[in-house]
Image: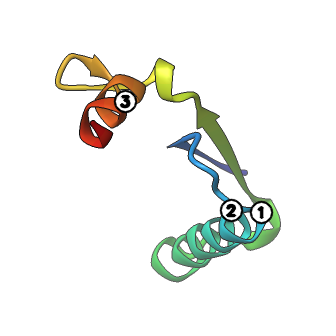
């Protein structure tokens, strides 16, 4: 069994976009590593803006600064 965990910032990602990410990752594992898609699990975790940071500041705070 192959388990892949993808973490993205919670940012209005649609169900269709998530499906495309899952399909793409599964395809890469099949093509590159020869994995069986029937035993490949992809899980997407969405991380709130306040729970992710860059350069010592939360992404929520950084986005507020760029809008100002």
Q: Are marks 2 and 1 in contact (CB under 8 Å)?
A: yes
Q: Earlier in the sequence, mark 3 or mark 2?
A: 2
* Secondary structure found at label 3: helix
The residue identified by callout 1 is 15
Q: Nearer the viewer, mark 3 or mark 1?
A: 3
Q: Are marks 3 and 2 in contact (CB under 8 Å)?
A: no
Q: Quadrant of residue 22?
A: bottom right
Q: Residue at x 20, y 16 (%)?
A: 56
Residue 43 falls left or right of residue 47 = right
Q: Residue at x 58, y 75 (%)?
A: 24
Q: CA–CA distance between discs 2 and 1?
A: 5 Å
Q: Residue at x 59, y 40 (%)?
A: 10
Q: Are marks 3 and 1 in contact (CB under 8 Å)?
A: no
* Percent x, y of residue 12: 64, 52
The residue identified by callout 2 is 18
* Percent x, y of residue 54: 25, 28
Q: CA–CA distance between discs 3 and 2?
A: 21 Å
* Percent x, y of residue 66: 25, 40
For the C terminus, the quadrant is top left
Q: CA–CA distance between discs 3 and 1?
A: 22 Å
| Residue toward you, 7 or 51 | 51
Q: Residue at x 26, y 18 (%)?
A: 57
Q: Quadrant of residue 58?
A: top left
* Secondary structure found at label 2: helix
Q: Above or below — where is 57 with respect to 8?
A: above
Which residue ends up furthest to the front in the rendered image?
Answer: 68
Residue 52 falls left or right of residue 28 = left
The residue identified by callout 3 is 59
* Percent x, y of residue 2: 66, 52
């Amino acid at each position: 069994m192959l388990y892949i965990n993808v973490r993205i910032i919670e940012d209005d990602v649609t169900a269709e976009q998530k499906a495309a990410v899952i399909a793409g990752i599964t395809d890469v594992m099949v093509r590159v590593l020869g994995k069986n898609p029937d035993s490949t699990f992809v899980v997407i975790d969405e991380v709130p803006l306040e729970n992710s940071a860059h350069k010592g500041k939360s992404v929520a705070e950084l986005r507020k600064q760029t809008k100002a």
